[in-house]
Amino acid sequence: MFDLPKYGDGVCLARMAELLEHLSIDRARLQRNAVVVTGSNGKGSTAAMCAAIGRAYGLRTGLFTSPHLFRFNERIQIDSVEIGDDALVRLKRRVEAAVATVSKRVDEKFGAFEALFALACLHFQESECDFVVFEAGIGGRYDPVRLIGARETCVTSVDYEHVELLGSSLELIASDKSDACVAGGAIVYGENCRGLRPHLVEHNRGAGRTSLFVRDEIGIDNETVAASDQYFDFQFGYHDYRRLEVSLPGAFQFNNAAIAVTLFLLWLQREQPRKAPDRIEAAIRAGLREARWPGRLETIRQDPLTVIDVGHTPDGIRQSLASLMSTHGRDGWILVTGASRDKRADEIVGALAPSFDTIICTAAHHKGADAQAIAAAARLGNPKANIHVAATVADAARLSQEMARRQKRSVYVAGGLFLAVEYATVVKGGRAEDLEFF
């Protein structure tokens, strides 16, 4: 969308502050109204659920996420409505002019994500949003979302990703993501961060930040997982909600839902204290029930049953696979898999291969690793599997759907975001080549 590189020069915080000031973004108001979601897996789902709760509470709610799956406009929404093309073009011109001016003044190049973040801030401000949920791009310490100065943030999960930028240990990665939170704020940590608790508590102590962990300070109990519906009990402080329904599939969504609820409760306590408890509980129940987020264990076809998942880190892959099996059963699956060239393909495919006796290996049009290399990883992970190689996702879709109908089996598509999105596009009659990402 912007004629800019994906990333700008070095650390972006100073030039981003100038850009927001040039665009007359009221950062004090933004800080009051916004929460920030960081993490390795589960960011999008958590952000979507938190925004849905805000909408159900009656707030004009903005949502900024990345990447998009099918259409660029998905990244910026207000009350679940994507930004319109006209507004996008108009604000793009304003941001481009501001970027040119500030870039010349500071003698640094901006990146496309930075420009998009500024555009989202402008859109939410013009639309007078009451509540805004921002998803971080990479990390938190140097991500544009740090300019918000959010008092309520979260780290949904932590896994090895972007190690060249965030660090080579989970401690360093979690610390980077934690630093999206302003001094004196509160950070909600997902369940898989609990092993890092001593480190994170000490990391936050100097900044006076409160550390809250799912399954410690935030209670989850009585989880029920089924193909049609999911429920869990939630407890935080004096808030005690029984049988909250979660519309997004997968057992891992209980963690994300608990984080989303806690983020909203913390924000509400700061901005609108002493509100009616019944109204708060009703909004939480409605938001979790009505939240929608494509791509995570999403059923895109019933005959044959076809499920896609956009998870692209080893831990995310393992969690989604476990949820698939517990929800739909372990038998009768054909796996379609691949991975992006910049991901740990061997580890990703190795986590999937042992659970399937029939595997179709392919390469996404966008950044896909070589299909033969994927097949080699699959053979290493499961020497007994019947392995096929499809040169393109279109070929993999055709083969998997034919095999599933003929053998009365189901199809699971997993290993990478681009793979899953391209497969869904092809099955619905589109072309992978027509998708655009950045």
Image: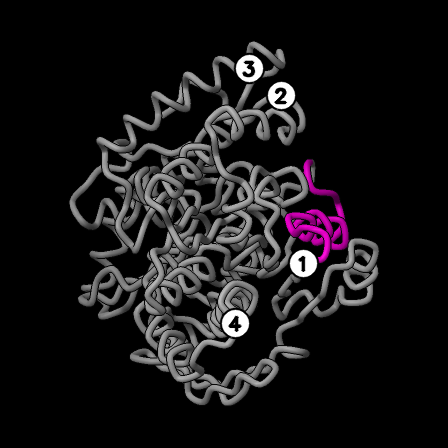
Q: What's the distance in space between the residues labelled 2 and 4, CA to CA?
A: 42 Å
* Residue at x 76% of width, y 54% of height: 171
Q: What's the distance in space between the residues labelled 2 and 3, CA to CA?
A: 10 Å
Image mark for residue 185: 1
Query: If you read the primary sequence from the N terminus, does the residue marked by circle 1 or circle 3 appear first?
Result: 3
The residue under label 3 is 103
The residue under label 2 is 9
Image mark for residue 273: 4
Task: Work out whether residue 271 or residue 173 is closer to the camera in this orientation and state it.
Answer: 271
Kind of residue sitting beneath label 4:
Pro
Residue 265: x and y in percent read 52, 71
Q: Do the residues labelled 2 and 3 touch (CB within 8 Å)?
A: no
Q: What's the distance in space between the residues labelled 1 and 2, CA to CA?
A: 29 Å
Tag nearer the camera, 2 or 3:
3
Image mark for residue 118: none
Circle 3: element type: helix
Color scheme of the displayed model: one colour
Circle 4: element type: loop
Establish if 101 lies above or below 372.
above
Q: Are marks 1 and 2 in contact (CB under 8 Å)?
A: no
Task: Work out whether residue 181 or residue 336 is closer to the camera in this orientation and state it.
Answer: 181
Chain part drawn in magenta: 165-184
Kind of residue sitting beneath label 1:
Gly
